[in-house]
């Protein structure tokens, strides 16, 4: 296992896509606070560093899809997996090493982004309003969210021996999960009541008071949507982007469930796969 990990991380640090994503996220960590600082100076506004701490999650679900497909798809296209099996490595260890490398790559990218944006944001925007333990918990769960994304895409990438097909599967899964989570978030954000209005004889709009919103989700369906909004990785992404720290514990638990479930499923499929 150690040999697999050593070889995998050696290739990772030579992977141009990984380096490119790392540099992009580092650049965003500098540009975003700089732009906000410019707006603060221009319009004499006060800012809060907390408004930028969850921005990285908007990218996590997509760059992990591309990165995992590239890292794992290359193993098939280069014949690396067959060589590993010939060398006596078990399929479980091969799968586990690939997952660790993808999770490690994601964690490194997120850690670099968060460190830079915290330092630059502290200088250009404002001091932290939340405590250090709260900030560390927020960063930790966001990295765990990245691991859950990596587990999903690793399971998908290992089902195809084509690098192109693996990339398509991962991106389609990311888009589908994003659309579902966006729909759920939009439905949950609907107010319970809305202002009613009518036109009088003069053609003027007159408010008639509050009336029930037909798009409001209530009852058991609302409870189910709320569960999905915290369970689905992209649903968590929306909560992180709004710095929702009220349920970090339950989100961490759901991430671990996804990580374990996707890993077990992926291992079962990969263990029976005919490697041509």
Image (spheres, rainbow, N blue to C red):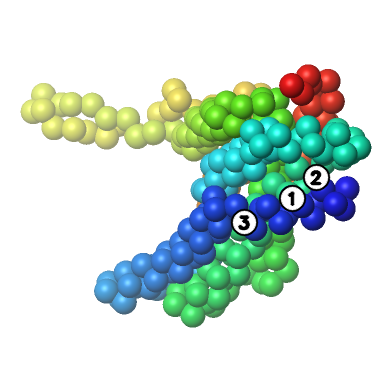
Q: In this view, does 269 lie to the left or right of 181?
A: right
In this rendering, the label closer to the viewer, 2 or 1: 1
Q: Is mark 1 on a helix, strand or loop?
A: helix
**Which of pointers 2 and 3 lies earlier in the amino acid sequence?**
3
User: Which residue position is annotated with label 1?
Assistant: 8
Earlier-in-chain disc, 2 versus 1? 1
Q: What element carries label 2?
A: helix
- Whether residue 44 sits left or right of residue 140 in the image: it is left
Could you tell me residue 86's position as x and y percent? 86, 34
Residue 69, by quadrant, is: top right
Q: Considering only order in the chain, which callout, 1 or 3, is on the residue closer to the N terminus?
A: 1
Please identify the quarter of the rendering in which residue 41 is found.
bottom left
Whether the residues at callouts 2 and 1 have beta carbons within 8 Å, the answer is: yes
| Mark 3 lies on residue | 14
Residue toward you, 85 or 235: 85
Q: Which of 218 and 54 is in front in this view?
A: 54
Mark 3 neighbour density, 10 Å: few (under 14) some (14–19) many (20 or more): few
In percent of width and height, residue 37 lies at 38, 73
| Residue 247 to residue 50: above or below | above
Quarter of the figure with the C terminus: top right
| Residue named by callout 2 | 97
Between the C-alphas of marks 3 and 1, the distance is 10 Å
């Amino acid at each position: 296992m150690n040999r697999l990990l050593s070889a995998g991380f050696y290739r990772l640090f030579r992977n141009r896509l990984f380096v490119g994503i790392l540099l992009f996220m580092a650049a965003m960590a500098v540009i975003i606070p700089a732009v906000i600082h410019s707006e603060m100076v221009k319009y004499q506004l006060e800012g809060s560093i907390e408004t930028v701490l969850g921005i990285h999650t908007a990218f996590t679900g997509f760059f992990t899809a591309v990165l995992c497909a590239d890292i794992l798809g290359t193993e098939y296209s280069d014949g690396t997996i067959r060589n590993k099996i010939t060398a006596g490595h078990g399929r479980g260890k091969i799968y586990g090493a690939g997952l660790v490398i993808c999770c490690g790559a994601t964690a490194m990218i997120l850690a670099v982004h968060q460190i830079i944006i915290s330092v630059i944001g502290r200088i250009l925007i404002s001091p932290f309003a939340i405590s250090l333990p709260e900030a560390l918990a927020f960063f930790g769960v966001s990295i765990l969210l990245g691991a859950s994304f990596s587990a999903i895409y690793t399971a998908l990438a290992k089902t195809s021996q084509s690098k192109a097909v693996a990339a398509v599967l991962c991106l389609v899964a990311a888009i589908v999960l994003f659309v579902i989570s966006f729909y759920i978030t939009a439905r949950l954000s609907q107010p319970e009541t809305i202002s009613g209005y009518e036109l009088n004889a003069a053609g003027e709009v007159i408010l008639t008071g509050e009336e029930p919103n037909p798009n409001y989700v209530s009852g058991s369906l609302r409870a189910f949507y709320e569960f999905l909004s915290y369970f689905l990785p992209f649903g968590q992404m929306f909560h992180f982007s709004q710095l929702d720290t009220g349920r970090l514990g339950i989100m961490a638990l759901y991430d671990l469930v996804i990580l374990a479930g996707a890993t077990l499923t992926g291992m079962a499929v990969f263990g029976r796969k005919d490697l041509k």
